[in-house]
Amino acid sequence: MDCVSAQVAMPRTRSFLTIVVLGISLALAACHEEGDIKIASLKLNGVKSVDKEQLANALQTRAGSRLPWGRKRFFDRRAFEADLKRLQAFYRDRGFPDARIASFDVKLNDKQDQVDITVNISEGEPVRVAALEVEGVDVLPEGERKKLLQSMPLQPEQPFDRQLALAARERVVNALRDRGYAYAEVQLHEETVGPKRSKLTLRATPGQLAYFGPVSIAGNKSVDQYVIERQLTYKPGELFKRTEMRESQRKLYRMELFEFANIETSEDRDKQPVQVPTKVTVAEGKHQRLTLGVGYGTEEQARTRIRWDHVNFTGGARHAGFEGKWSSLDRGVRMDFQEPYFFSPHFSLAFRGEAWQAREPVYSANRLGGRFILTHQANSANKWSVSLIDEYQRSSIAPAGLLDFTIRNALISLGLDPRTGEQRGTLSAVAFDVSRTTSNSVLDPRHGYILSWHLEQAGSWLWGDFNYWSTQGEARHYLPMGRRLVLANRLGAGTIDGRRDLEANVPFYKRFFLGGASSIRGWGRFEVSPLSGFGLPIGGHTFLEGSSEARLPAIWGKLGAVAFLDYGNVWPGTFEFGKLRYAVGPGLRYLTPIGPARFDFGWQLAPIDNLRVNGDPEHRHWRVHFSIGQAF
């Protein structure tokens, strides 16, 4: 055997397997010290019926990163020998008892410091589920029984995956315990009914109907007990439901007071009392936090942020915070305060005050003021809020706009001083927001949807210098396709209208603009808009915007890729669906602890004639964007 390649056909005998692996490792050691040989690649050939990524994650032998700063991994003969056995055990658990290692190849490079490993797998024929029966669930309503059977993770004619069989058993247990049967037990029985055919029977014993009993709390020190109790979504005497315990636990975590929170039953299962006692155990975290951050994006350029939070300010889980930020797009300071329990556990009251400056490519806006926000959140998915806004604002158009004498009259109609390009006034408004979220992640969602709607009314019966109404809505949907691909779609629209048809009743910074890293990516920020006669974007009163992305979260380690289509437009009046701007392009994503680092290249399919950027004619039909987080 030389130091370049070692390829062996694998019989089934364990002793021979050990001898072969030892021989290979000795050959490698003769060329280099053990532990110094890096694993350059690991290929698993023949994997068709199981998740290849899950299979690779079950192994200790893994390829190292090719990036200079990435983690390196080294060949270990003991780990490799154990992994060959682990591969067969993985397949057996998923219904493939005849799966085996057909052969493997361990090859050194010319420098004899890296190794490429190839494992060829023969899966064989699986044992399939001939029938699935669930007994003892007659206590459930008929509709729930049908839904339970249809949602089973293991179905007839699928390979007999033991992990899925255990998940099916757990699903039946949860269905009963969410209906008050706290002591429900389910036994799993497997019966061979033919060659490569097995019947699965889940036999449930519901037990007696139970109710929540007394609650005990442990682990809290500075957080009062009543603060924890009011987060519980159940009370003693109510019908026992395991889902209420899980929802209560999530609510405790959302308070940001605890590093650990757990709710469990503390009943004597042998006696099976009707009143089921529960125990809440928490471990408090730090209540005061100071966060410093720096970053860079193609739109914001360099940015820095400092934030201080106190999540138990004056007790009662009240939240107080202070934030300062600086970037080329926005800068300023803001403070906020939240009362999490406002007469009801579902209502909270917050106040936010700020002195903030936005410096967009088209305009700049200074705001000084605040808002009160009353929020109702019944559960983790549904939320609505009402806001009272009072701000003094000063907006000014970009300097290039003052050089365009053709829009002098337009500036006046927009409420801007034609000499300075400024607009000043007090904005008083009431806003209503409602949202529903079922997505699995905020930073990198892969399934579920997000619906949101915003309605705002300024002036009229309120004080202030502006008088308008505005509404916006957006829908996002994330659909996994197969094991890796995710299809993401977004559609949004909105309109704003000055009362008595006077545009000056609308603050200039409230007008709609599209384009940028999170909008129509073929253009720069705020470049998709109605134009002045000189070619400067001046915003509009109506917009429609959409995006579709095909996302591959991992094509190589933590590196992913996307292909996108963006579309939309802004109009001075009503919608004109036949006049949309389109952009397409590819993108790269690199997974970081704070979300995917994003690089997108957008190409315009319908360029905007006469567009000027910073006062100069724009001839480019493409844009490059870099930022953190998915586009939507």
Image (cartoon, rainbow, N blue to C red):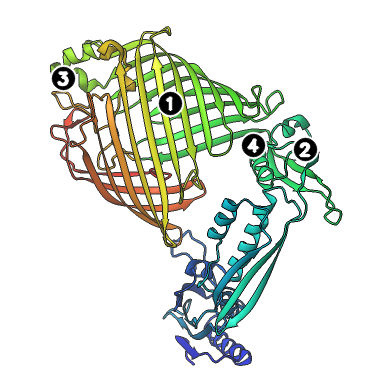
Instruction: Provide the secondary structure element on which disc 3 rests.
Output: loop
Corner quadrant of residue 256: top right
Mark 3 or 2: the one toward you: 2
The amino acid beneath tag 2 is: Gly
Dot 2 or dot 1, earlier in sequence: 2
Q: CA distance from mark 4 to mark 3?
A: 52 Å
> Is there a contact, CB below 8 Å, between mark 3 and mark 2?
no
Would you call the spot at circle 4 few (<14 residues within 10 Å), some (14-19), or many (20 or more)?
some
Instruction: Provide the secondary structure element on which disc 2 rests.
Output: loop
> Is there a contact, CB below 8 Å, between mark 4 and mark 1?
no
Of the pair 518 and 382, the residue shown nearer to us: 382
The amino acid beneath tag 1 is: Arg
Corner quadrant of residue 408: top left
Corner quadrant of residue 627: top left
Q: CA distance from mark 4 to mark 1?
A: 27 Å
Mark 4 or 2: the one toward you: 2
Dot 4 or dot 2, earlier in sequence: 2
Question: What residue would you read off at disc 2?
Answer: 237
Q: What is the number of the mark on residue 331?
A: 1
The amino acid beneath tag 3 is: Asp
Mark 4 or 3: the one toward you: 4
Question: What residue would you read off at disc 4?
Answer: 256
Mark 4 or 1: the one toward you: 4
